[in-house]
Image (tube, rainbow, N blue to C red):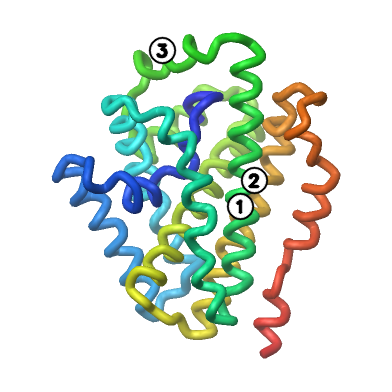
Amino acid sequence: MLSPALNYDFICYPLKTQYFDRLSSSLQNEVTNLFSTIEKGLMNDHDLKSFSASQLKNLFNLRMKAIGWFLEDNHLNDLNQTIDECYDAFDSLNQNSKMVYFVENLKYALRANRRLLNSFVEHAHSSGNSEQIETELRSSFLEINYDQFITSIALGVPDEDAAQRIIDLVGASLLIEFSAISGGILIEKKIELSEEKAIQLTSVISSAGQDYSAICYELGLFSRAKSTHPQMQFDNDFIKEQQQLADLGLNDLLEN
């Protein structure tokens, strides 16, 4: 986590769909290579749970480059809007009955990300330090790779359990990115997954969304904003929603 006012947990997918033409050729190549790798993984015989885990480093490394690009190119305000612009992009997958539960779980994960961002933005505004946060981020940002991130958390957070939860939270957010990218590829390339692959992909996003929201609650990230703020009156409903979506459609899919 780099800043309490910026949405950097959902950045790789919109980097391709919304900002690709603005990128340098080298960054375009990195984005294209990652998307191509994920497309091949969707099409081959590998289990998607294992394959998605194998892409965490690549996703993290691209995320860091994306954050650096936004900081350099002065598009920080655009970054806060990306999740709203992407939210309905996956609806066309609902035409395939095998992908309905994937879409529902992906949207659930994106709503959790939006709630986290709302909490951070409200906290920054209420403390009156939004500009200071942005200035500090610009001056202190250092592009690191995934292994360096793991090391920095392990060494910098004295509580081992808390350190692991932070790592798990970032991992879940990367799997949400993986799922969004996968969904975008399926739409763009008009690929129809087998029923087995659809179940695997749904399982990836279901677990990632649940973990992401649960860890946010556990770490107190959803409670940063003032409790009187009308947008933040969602805790009970959100918990119920999480329970209802916990195995959304997976049993039905497995029984078919």
Asked if the residue at tag 1 contacts the one at tag 2, i.e. Cβ–Cβ closer than 8 Å, the answer is: yes
Q: Is residue 110 above or below residue 102?
A: above
41 and 92: which is toward the camera: 92
Asked if the residue at tag 3 contacts the one at tag 1, i.e. Cβ–Cβ closer than 8 Å, the answer is: no
Q: Is residue 150 above or below residue 47?
A: above
Which badge, 2 or 3, is on the more N-terminal residue? 2
In the rendered image, which residue does mark 1 sit on? 109
Question: Which residue is outermost to the left?
Answer: 25
The quarter in which the C terminus is drawn is bottom right
Q: Position of residue 97 (x, y in %)?
A: 59, 81
Q: Is residue 147 above or below residue 205?
A: above
In the rendered image, which residue does mark 2 sit on? 112
Secondary structure at badge 3 equals helix
Which badge, 1 or 3, is on the more N-terminal residue? 1
In the rendered image, which residue does mark 3 sit on? 135
Query: Could you classify mark 1 by the number of other residues whose Cα lies within 10 Å: few (under 14), some (14-19), or many (20 or more)?
Result: many
Separation of residues labelled 2 and 1 (CA atoms): 5 Å
Secondary structure at badge 1 equals helix
Q: Which residue is painted at 59% across and 25% down in the image?
A: 121
Q: Position of residue 75 (x, y in %)?
A: 35, 30
The quarter holding residue 114 reads top right
Secondary structure at badge 2 equals helix
Q: Position of residue 105 (x, y in %)?
A: 63, 62
Q: Which residue is painted at 29% across and 32% down in the image?
A: 69
Q: Amino acid at mark 1?
A: Ala
Tell whether 77 sits left or right of 88: left
What is the number of the mark on residue 127?
A: none
Q: Amino acid at mark 3?
A: Thr
Q: Which residue is painted at 48% across and 12% down in the image?
A: 131
Q: Position of residue 122 (x, y in %)?
A: 65, 23
Q: Amino acid at mark 2?
A: Ala
